[in-house]
Amino acid sequence: MSNTPHTLQEEFPFAIEKLRALKGADPRFAKLLEDYDAINDRVHRAETHVDAMDELAEVALRKQRAAIKDEIARALALADV
């Protein structure tokens, strides 16, 4: 497992198989997962000071990550997989 906090496996430990199934069946969902991972990596790099970022930009990224996570949670709740 990654050392980056807030991975999807940590956020949705009960739905790992469902995440995989939806990712393979729905290109839009797969894109959501890619977007989440990319933003989560950027947040982590900012938090660990690998990439310099002002506080407002970091907060904006966290909000973006939360919005995508909410979309993923909705899709998981509605999925028939």
Image: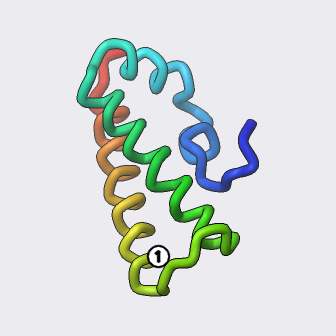
Which residue: 49% across, 44% down?
37
Residue drawn where x is 56% and y is 47% of the image: 11
In this picture, is 34 found above or below 69? above
Q: Is 33 drawn above or below residue 54 in the view shown?
A: above
Residue 74 rendering spot, x and y as whole percentages = 30, 42
The amino acid type of the residue labelled 1 equals Glu
Residue on which the image places disc 1: 58
- State the residue in front, 73 or 49: 49
- Asked if residue 11 lies left or right of residue 32, the reply is right
Q: Quadrant of the N terminus?
A: top right
Residue 1 versus residue 48 in the image, above or below: above
Residue 35 screen position, x and y as percent: 37, 44
Residue 9: image quadrant is: top right
Looking at this view, name the residue that lies furthest to the bottom. 55
Question: Which quarter of the rendering shows the C terminus?
Answer: top left
Residue ID at (51%, 79%): 53
